[in-house]
Amino acid sequence: MTEPTALNLPQVDPLPEATARYFEICQEKLGLVPNVLRAYAFDIAKLDAFTAMYNDLMLAPSGLTKLEREMIAVVVSSINRCWYCQVAHGAAVRAISGDPALGEAMVMNWRVAKITHRQKVMLAFVEKATKASAEITEDDRNALRAEGFTDRDIFDIAAVTGFFNMSNRVASAVGMEPNPEYHAQAR
């Protein structure tokens, strides 16, 4: 059995076969099992719900690139000061972009990052949705449309933003620690 990664909630032991296989796939593809998965493994139904939503938002077909979705995760996590997600998704930005400086800029201050105007407009929307979602107006959505984002893309931006706002709060509240391996990835 693996040590708990947050609070004192040890994972189900033994893990169900499907969960154990999913963890094996993570180990094979990522070189680690993300601590967020281990943290949720005290309750397989919660783990399954979390992974289903994550996989849909971050990996399913979308008008947003994988890099753009990771950028959203990092910007939300930076605003919320979520240690786990800044480290994990900062590493993902570095890996996907091939640019270590981009991952660092996204974590520290996305406005100084060398990104497209379209991405800056997207991330300004993400920031507003994170800090003051009730203040979003049609003008904000129209700014996205002017950059070529479809209404489906806007929904995806909002959904990824909402997911990471929730995930950040859970991770911070339960003391989730990032896997140490993330710190050295894609540098």
Image (cartoon, rainbow, N blue to C red):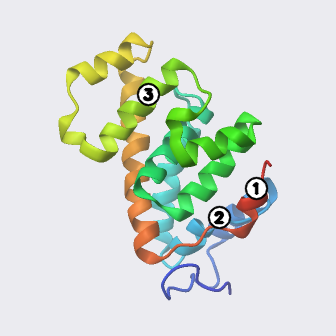
Q: Amino acid at mark 3?
A: Met
Q: Which residue is mark 3?
A: 122
Q: Secondary structure at mark 3?
A: helix
Q: CA distance from mark 2 to mark 1?
A: 9 Å
Q: Residue at x 58, y 84 (%)?
A: 4
Comparing labels 3 and 1, the label whose residue is closer to the camera: 3
Tell me the residue at 30%/22% (across/down). Answer: 141
Write down the residue under mark 1: 30
Q: Amino acid at mark 1?
A: Leu
Q: Is residue 46 above or below residue 150?
A: below
Identify the residue at the far front of this view: 112
Q: CA distance from mark 3 to mark 2?
A: 27 Å
Q: Secondary structure at mark 1?
A: helix
Residue annotated with mark 2: 34
Q: Earlier in the sequence, mark 3 or mark 2?
A: 2
Front residue of 151/187: it is 187
**Residue closer to the observer: 135 or 9:** 135
Residues under labels 3 and 1: Cα distance?
28 Å
Residue 1 placed where, x, y %? Answer: 68, 87
Which quadrant holds residue 26? bottom right
Foreground of the two, 187 or 33: 187
x, y percent for residue 159: 38, 40
Few, some or many residues within 10 Å of mark 2 (<14, 14–19, 20+): some
Residue 122 coordinates in the image, percent (x, y):
43, 28
x 56%, y 55%: residue? 86
